Image (cartoon, rainbow, N blue to C red):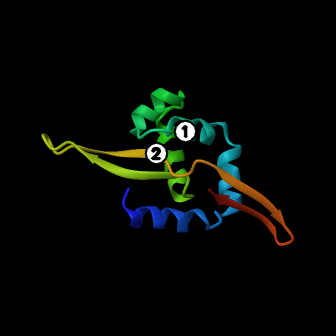
Amino acid sequence: MSSYEGERRSEEAEQALPRSVALKLLASDTGVALLRAAGSPATACELRDRSGVPLSTVYRETSKLVEAGLLEETVRVDVEDGRHASVYERAVESLRVSVTDDGVDVIPE
């Protein structure tokens, strides 16, 4: 990882996630199963195999997890035949949930 990527991640890590989205995804057995399965880079099919979540649900939920900043999506290209696939990996190792006078914050760490 370049120093720029490390700086970008630390800046992103300090930003609170939309709490309703993050908490809803984390309250879901499917969301938790996919986050567990994405501990190392994996395609949607690999996430299905690791988690037992149906493939159509994997596609729908990974999209939400990426949008919430909990998963990172990159593209893997096969240089021999030009095929490509999205690869997903957990974007955070932990989250801090804080109750404040202003409400609830969910902050990636």
Mark closer to the chain start, 1 or 2: 1
User: Residue, x 78% and y 60% (percent of image)?
Assistant: 98
Residue type at mark 1 is Leu
Which picture quadrant has residue 83?
Answer: top left
In this rendering, the answer to whether 55 lies above or below 70 is: above
Quadrant in the picture for the C terminus = bottom right
User: Residue, x 55% and y 38% (percent of image)?
Assistant: 34
Residue type at mark 2 is Glu
User: Residue, x 15% and y 44% (percent of image)?
Assistant: 79
In the drawing, does residue 58 fall left or right of residue 23? left
Counting other residues with Cα less than 10 Å from the Cα at mark 2, is it few (<14), some (14-19), or many (20 or more)? many
Q: Position of residue 68 (x, y in %)?
A: 57, 58
**Element at label 2:** strand
Quadrant in the picture for the N terminus = bottom left
In the orientation shown, which residue stands out farthest toward the bottom? Answer: 102
Report which residue position mark 1 lands on. Answer: 34
In the orientation shown, which residue stands out farthest toward the right? Answer: 101
In-front residue for pair 1/13: 1
Q: Position of residue 38 (x, y in %)?
A: 49, 39
In the drawing, does residue 24 fall left or right of residue 13? right
Mark 1 or 2, which is nearer the eye?
2
Q: Position of residue 54 (x, y in %)?
A: 51, 31
Report which residue position mark 2 lands on. Answer: 89
Counting other residues with Cα less than 10 Å from the Cα at mark 1, is it few (<14), some (14-19), or many (20 or more)? many
Q: CA distance from mark 1 to mark 2?
A: 10 Å
In this rendering, the answer to whether 18 lies above or below 95 is: below
**Element at label 1:** helix
In this rendering, the answer to whether 103 lies above or below 58 is: below
